[in-house]
Amino acid sequence: MKQAFHTVTVSTRGPGLYEFTDAVAEFVRGSGIADGLLTCFVRHTSASLLIQENADPDVQKDLQDFFAWLAKSGPRFRHTAEGPDDMPSHIRSALTQTSIGIPLQKSRLALGTWQGIYLFEHRDAPHQREVMLHVIGE
Amino acid sequence: MKQAFHTVTVSTRGPGLYEFTDAVAEFVRGSGIADGLLTCFVRHTSASLLIQENADPDVQKDLQDFFAWLAKSGPRFRHTAEGPDDMPSHIRSALTQTSIGIPLQKSRLALGTWQGIYLFEHRDAPHQREVMLHVIGE
Amino acid sequence: MKQAFHTVTVSTRGPGLYEFTDAVAEFVRGSGIADGLLTCFVRHTSASLLIQENADPDVQKDLQDFFAWLAKSGPRFRHTAEGPDDMPSHIRSALTQTSIGIPLQKSRLALGTWQGIYLFEHRDAPHQREVMLHVIGE
């Protein structure tokens, strides 16, 4: 049984979905592990993770619009010191994922045909987002 | 340390929750692993996973109604080529889970008394949904 | 490769976020595992898990208010036998997490600077909530 770790940095330029499936696949290949469990973990509370369709880019735009609408539809926020986009970002993160586990079998991630792995940026300003990858198996 | 994999296929007939706890329990029993971590991963972006109460079936109907309402309450969608139920399905998936990890101790999943594992179908048409199961432990 | 299990009990006094990061860190330290994967799993369907900002307590209050608002904004519920706060609790759970995986490297959880691990209580009455912790690694 073996393990490997790697940190992927995703550069963002405003809210929306940024795919990093290739970086995950490359890490898994390099790990020499063929069967096991991959975990992606985002080290932030105003950006999150999502597995979504990577065929039609309109899906990603519609997701961004929906979450922008939803996070601003509720009651007024107390936490505004870090800007008007900060508390909606925490809400969008809470509604999506901080951590995703994906089985790995015969050197292939269990992702379906149309599934991509995305960093979901919620803040307006550009950010460098860290996603820690871990794989355990053999 | 050992591992096992299995794909469960859930046949769906329209939106709602389909329990498959028994299939997971059977896989775990057959794996010969008593202590470890089980992962369920759905290989689709218009169906998702949920752990929910399996006592009163009304809970499942109310969940279905809530998510149907929420996914259609936001802004108009760009992505409509695959039907009016497609983009709401992606949103419902983004709001729930693609992957769930459950500890396994002394041959028992950590599920609480009332917790069942569900495939949450979001599309109107019948589908065959694949959930990959993975267990690692000893 | 080793494993360890532990159940944390979180005492709640009404809806909101209860941090238990320290209990997780203590468990990991005591396990003697330096590199691996930690999983938190909540054994309930009307309380859930969330990783969120642990700096400004207003973030936690705003999250509580948002989810209280959202879960009550949809269609009327069928499932009311266990009280008016029960079905909104299932919805709030479905919108957040039952299970969270966190990589562990060199005896440190991958948590970012401002990330804390929270039990998100959704019911009005006080509860004792069980979170099962599992770590696998070496």
Image (cartoon, coloured by chain):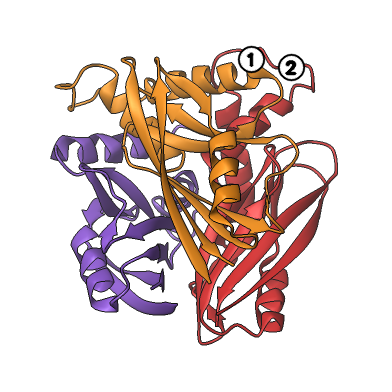
Chain colours: A purple, B orange, C red
Q: Secondary structure under badge 2?
A: loop
Q: Nearer the viewer, residue A65 or B93?
A: B93
Kind of residue sitting beneath label 2: Thr
Q: Nearer the viewer, residue B37 or A71?
A: B37
Q: Quadrant of the C terminus of chain B?
A: bottom right
Q: Which quadrant of the view contains residue C23? A: bottom right
Kind of residue sitting beneath label 1: Phe
Seen in the image, is A105 located left or right of residue C95?
A: left
Q: Position of residue C43 (x, y in %)?
A: 70, 47
Which residue position holds label 2?
C80
Q: Position of residue A18 (x, y in %)?
A: 23, 55
Callout 1 crowding tier (Cα within 10 Å): few <14, some 14–19, many ≥20: some
Q: Nearer the viewer, residue C65 or B118?
A: B118
Look at the numbered discs 1 and 2 and tell me whether their residues touch, using CB distance below 8 Å: yes
Q: Position of residue A127 (x, y in %)?
A: 29, 66
* Subunit of label 1: C
Which residue position holds label 1?
C77
* Figure check: B108 above or below B97: below
* Subunit of label 2: C
Would residue A66 be visible to someone looking at this image?
yes
Q: CA distance from mark 1 to mark 2?
A: 7 Å
* Figure check: B56 above or below B130: above
Residue pictured at 23% horizontal, 64% vertical: A25
Q: Position of residue B31 (x, y in %)?
A: 54, 54
